[in-house]
Image (cartoon, rainbow, N blue to C red):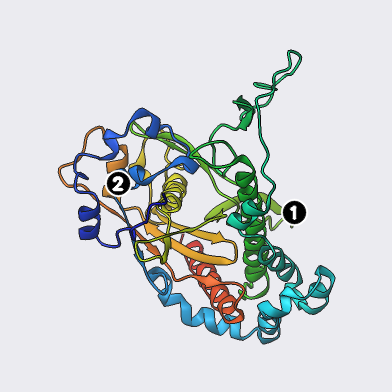
């Protein structure tokens, strides 16, 4: 029987009510299996230990000062904005890739990716439409499972089903009653959602952000980044699905540097919500846990030899863009010095800090008006990053 979900705590009081034993269940009390669990395996127990509070908001508070100039910057690109908002979901559903490229203007590749997402079958309906197969363990003396031939994603067979080591991003395996084919569908959904996000996020800074510097650019990189979380209390790895970066050009050779400055992660999910007690969709605790892992990991990865005191305000300010199918949201957290000290502490401090994460409203990229609003948020992010760079 399916369980209903409660809305994750948005205040410290809500957190204390949801987790009445939070003072004992600190990060120091995590079981070894939870300490070593990679990002895709983080659960509500990690959220309690990390003392995370998620506060919904319309606009991320840190971006509010940058939104007016972001709106003006986007509005100044009226022809390109017209391309971004020209096609409705109904029109997209009736067009081929070639027609989308012919009618999508400078955002033609975005429309193709959006069409691919909108044409994905629902995970549940896909499972119902698939013929049932009776899987039996392979019983041939000459059969080689291939175990150990590839690392780290080598396949281990369990009862005739393939099982991959848990990692982030998601890889299919047999757990929690999931059918293996359903999990393969899940990886497909995540990959196509990630492609949509890449097309959208990469196009906005390139076409709508008004960047004028010839030797510094904020861009999107499709290359995933692995983050190492290493302390006395955590030892694991998580991985994002791409990132916003800053790249600079050598003013003498005029070549763009192979080095890049990380600014913001992208995370793609196939399924984002679960039903609450009233049947309404609420963000899954497991998704929130993975988001916390990635944001915390991006901070911990730049700490050397546990010297977290060297982190500055910019190092502790972290953003995450999360997409599931065509819905995109923005998250931000400031990892205060006392919170980072808690993560690296040997014993719980007298006063236990909380991690406050702000989560923006949802933007549905199938809705033309939402595309423009999401683009304005990305441009505001770019304005913030540019100001931080000019301040350094």
Residue 343 placement, left or right of 155: left
Residue 54 on image: x %, y %: 34, 60
Residue 346, labelled with which disc? none
Q: Is residue 202 visible?
A: yes
In the foreground, 389 or 22: 22
Residue 86 falls in image quadrant: bottom right
Residue at image x 37%, y 35%?
A: 306
Residue at image x 40%, y 44%?
A: 43
Residue assigned mark 1: 253
In the foreground, 392 or 332: 332
Residue assigned mark 2: 48
Residue 191 on image: x %, y %: 65, 52
Q: Earlier in the sequence, mark 1 or mark 2?
A: 2
Residue 125 falls in image quadrant: bottom right
How crowded is the residue under tag 2: few (<14 C-alpha within 10 Å), some, or many (20+)?
many
3D distance between C-alphas at marks 1 and 2: 51 Å
Q: Residue furthest top?
A: 141
Q: Residue furthest left?
A: 350
SS label for mark 1? loop
Residue 38 placement, left or right of 234: right
Residue 309 on image: x %, y %: 33, 43
Q: How many marks?
A: 2
Closest to the camera, between mark 1 and mark 2, is 2
How crowded is the residue under tag 1: few (<14 C-alpha within 10 Å), some, or many (20+)?
few
Q: Is residue 217 visible?
A: no
In the foreground, 287 or 94: 94
């Amino acid at each position: 029987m399916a369980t209903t979900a409660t809305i994750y705590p948005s205040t410290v009081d809500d957190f204390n009510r949801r987790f009445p034993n939070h003072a004992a269940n600190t990060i120091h009390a995590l079981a070894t299996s939870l300490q070593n669990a990679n990002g895709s395996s983080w659960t509500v127990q990690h959220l309690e230990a990390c003392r995370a509070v998620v506060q919904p908001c319309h606009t991320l508070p840190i971006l509010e000062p940058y939104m007016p100039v972001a709106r003006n910057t986007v509005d100044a690109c009226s022809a390109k904005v017209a391309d971004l908002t020209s096609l409705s979901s109904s029109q997209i559903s009736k067009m081929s890739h070639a027609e989308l490229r012919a009618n999508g203007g400078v955002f033609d590749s975005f429309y193709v990716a959006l069409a691919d997402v909108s044409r994905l079958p629902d995970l549940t309906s896909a499972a119902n439409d698939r013929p049932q197969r009776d899987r039996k363990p392979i019983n041939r003396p000459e059969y080689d499972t291939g175990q150990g031939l590839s690392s780290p994603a080598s396949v281990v067979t369990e009862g005739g089903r393939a099982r991959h080591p848990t990692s982030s991003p998601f890889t299919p395996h047999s757990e929690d009653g999931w059918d293996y084919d359903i999990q393969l569908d899940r990886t497909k959904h995540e990959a196509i959602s990630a492609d949509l996000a890449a097309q959208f996020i990469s196009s906005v800074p390139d076409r709508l952000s008004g960047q004028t510097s010839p030797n510094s650019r904020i861009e999107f990189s499709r290359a995933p980044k692995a983050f190492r979380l290493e302390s006395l209390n955590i030892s694991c790895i998580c991985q994002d699905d791409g990132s916003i970066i800053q790249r600079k050009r050598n003013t003498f050779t005029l070549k763009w540097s192979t080095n890049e400055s990380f600014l913001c992660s992208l995370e793609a999910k196939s399924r984002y919500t679960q039903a609450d007690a009233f049947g309404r969709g609420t963000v899954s605790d497991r998704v929130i846990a993975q988001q916390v892992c990635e944001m915390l990991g991006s901070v911990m990865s730049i700490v050397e030899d546990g010297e977290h005191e060297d982190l500055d305000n910019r190092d502790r300010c972290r953003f995450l863009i999360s997409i599931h199918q065509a819905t995109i949201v923005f998250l931000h957290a400031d990892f205060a010095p006392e919170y980072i000290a808690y993560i690296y502490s040997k014993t719980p401090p007298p006063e236990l800090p909380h991690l406050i994460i702000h989560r923006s409203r949802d933007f549905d990229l199938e809705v033309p008006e939402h595309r423009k609003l999401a683009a304005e948020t990305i441009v505001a992010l770019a304005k913030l990053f540019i100001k931080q760079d000019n301040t350094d």
